[in-house]
Amino acid sequence: MTLTDYERSELKRAIMIDGWDEWTKLGLTRSQISDIADRLTSTGKFMLTAHGEIVGDDVALAIDDLKSNKANAHLFRRADEPADEPRKTVPDAIQSLSAKDRLRLANDQMFADLARQGRKP
């Protein structure tokens, strides 16, 4: 069932209110709560009655289900907690190259990809 923008925002608001005890236990920021509520809204497990009450799954259980999935661990990390592993955007070997050499390497990889696809540059 497709929700209008208004219905979706009202459902999200109701989920945020209903899950308030859970949010405070986890110590999440407002933006984290909003992001998680968006994800819960899009699951389709909740509906809103005409009186603004949530029908469907229990919000606390849905939060626990979302939290138990390792792929969603970043959603529940407090801001003061360190990340699991520092993320590297560029491998060290490439980082040590000069800008001209990095450009040459990128061009070589692009041309190799085009050749593999059977396309001409």
Image (cartoon, rainbow, N blue to C red):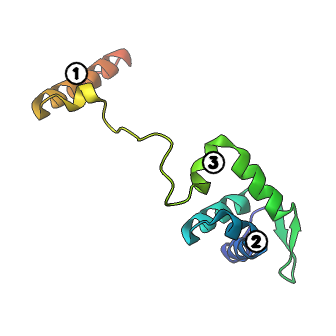
> Which residue bears the numbered disc 2?
21
> Which residue bears the numbered disc 1?
108
Residue 82 coordinates in the image, percent (x, y): 48, 50
User: Taking 82 as reference, is 68 left or right?
Assistant: right
Are dots 2 and 3 in contact, CB under 8 Å?
A: no
98 versus 73 height, above or below = above
User: Taking 56 as reference, is 18 left or right?
Assistant: left
Residue 24 coordinates in the image, percent (x, y): 68, 70
Visible residue check, residue 44: no
69 versus 6 height, above or below = above
Element assignment for label 1: helix
- State the separation of the CA atoms marked 2 and 1: 55 Å
Are dots 2 and 1 in contact, CB under 8 Å?
A: no
Say which mark, if any, is on residue 72: 3
In what quadrant of the picture does the N terminus appear? bottom right
Residue 97 coordinates in the image, percent (x, y): 16, 28
